[in-house]
Image (cartoon, grey):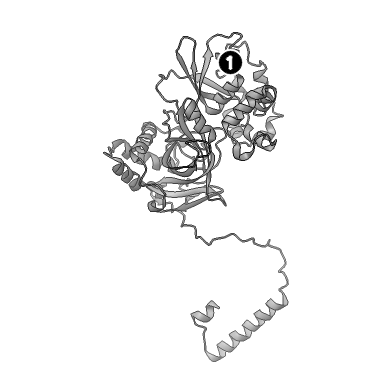
Amino acid sequence: MLAGTAVSANDLGPFRISNTQLETVAWSEIGGWTADDHTAAFKTFLNSCKAIVRGTPPGRAGQPFYAALQSVCRRAVAAHPHDSNAARIFFEQNFRPMRIAPLGESNGFLTGYYEPIIVGSLVANDEFKVPIYKTPPNLALRVPQKKVAAASMGIWRRKAHRNTGFYYDRTAIEEGALAGRKLEICWLKDPTDLFFAQIQGSVRVKLPDGKVMRLNYDSHNGWPYTPIGRILIERNVVPRDQMSMDRIREWMQANPDEGKELRRQNKSFVFFRETGLAEHEEPMGAQGISLTPGRSIATDKFIHVYGTPFFIEAELPIENEKSATRFQRLMVSQDTGGAILGPARADLYWGAGDEPAHIAGRIRHPGQFTMLIPREIDLVAAGARTPLPRPRPAFAKVEDKPEKTSEKPEKPAAEKSAVDQKKTDQKKEASSGHKPDKSERAQ
């Protein structure tokens, strides 16, 4: 949902997102737009469209943005662009580009994620003793969905500590609160492996017989997500410019006791489900479709609609930690995450295995976001028009306004003198029949 964006028949207004800068741009202003592989982008977009055309989720019914995107998707399903140029033309004919950033900033923020491959077992023993749990049957009773959503947005943090209905936190679960309830899907060797699998939202577990079990995010305990990397920075353990998932893992493995304490600072705990995916298939995103490495992104589900395309421009450490590879690519929102909050915030999906893990772990970088807005967004609410915002002037600035008071403030002597002089001049003009011309009014 585009919070604050959609308009109803009774409340027509311009396209906007709360606390967000939106600026219309021309396609020619997007760096690398024509050079991108639009065939690959269209294929990823089409995957989203097939799901969108099949039906509207209950929470999207009546939302103008979703309806507009659904209209574009119907044309996408029927289209068969024969090359990258034709695919690019499809996007240009069906969307308008709009720069999007948090209020007062020019860039958004990018991170990366991947699918871990971890050795595990279907039975517990001295080597494999860290359980991966499925969703407890009493979770829905203890944590209503609206509270889970609120906690994900970070607005339930204060209440959670005193609310007896909140579910077990990470510490309680790691200490055995769910043991013996037949919720274990499988077991891993290291709690750090489980922790990172929960952050990524999916995992491939390699069993002793060579088979691979595919697990995906199913639910979580409702507690807010706390980034432990931020804690390490605040404690001066890892410098901000050196922070990465690899550094976090290295520190936790080198300091197991401190690592346990750090891990438990994040009270959020993820439960998984078995997907039955083949080994060659990519994991499912929150939209319910397979992700595409290098094209799928996770965005804030409370702001954006799954299937929305975003063109991302950034310089990312893809080759190694010190590289600054130019990244200019059309991505599609197909997933979400507890830490992915804000209008210009994206997690880039890179694939499964060690190399995608290293790339994803290095990315904590600013990036420019251009959101593709369906052209139908102009025609919503039974034909009523929703105008797009006018381009933001380069010289625009916000000035503080004085608070209103019941009494009129006393004018400075110099200002009163100027007002008196103006009244005198106006009397002279009236008597002489002279009116100031444009140059005089401009002074």
| Number of residues whose C-alpha sits closer than 10 Å to that of mark 1, classed few (under 14), some (14–19) or many (20 or more) | some
Q: Which residue is mark 1?
A: 189
Q: In the picture shown, does residue 189 fall above or below 242? A: above
Relative image position of residue 294 (x, y in whole percent):
43, 34
| SS under mark 1 | loop
Q: Which residue is nearer to you in this view: 215 or 380?
A: 215
Q: Residue at x 43, y 51 (%)?
A: 386
Q: In the picture shown, does residue 327 fall above or below 205? A: below
In the displayed structure image, the side of residue 177 where residue 319 appears, left or right = left
Relative image position of residue 241 (x, y in whole percent):
60, 40
Relative image position of residue 432 (x, y in whole percent):
54, 91
Q: Residue at x 68, y 34 (%)?
A: 237
Where is the C terminus found, in terms of image quarters?
bottom right
Q: Which residue is nearer to you in this view: 318 or 232?
A: 318
Q: Residue at x 37, y 43 (%)?
A: 36
Q: In the picture shown, does residue 3 fall above or below 115? A: below
In the displayed structure image, the side of residue 309 where residue 360 appears, left or right = right
Q: Which residue is nearer to you in this view: 264 or 163?
A: 264
Q: Residue at x 73, y 72 (%)?
A: 410
Q: In the picture shown, does residue 392 fall above or below 48? A: below
Quarter residue 143 falls in: top right
In the displayed structure image, the side of residue 333 where residue 424 appears, left or right = right
- Tag 1: residue type? Lys
Camera sees residue 140: no
Relative image position of residue 427 (x, y in whole percent):
60, 87
Q: Residue furthest bottom?
A: 432
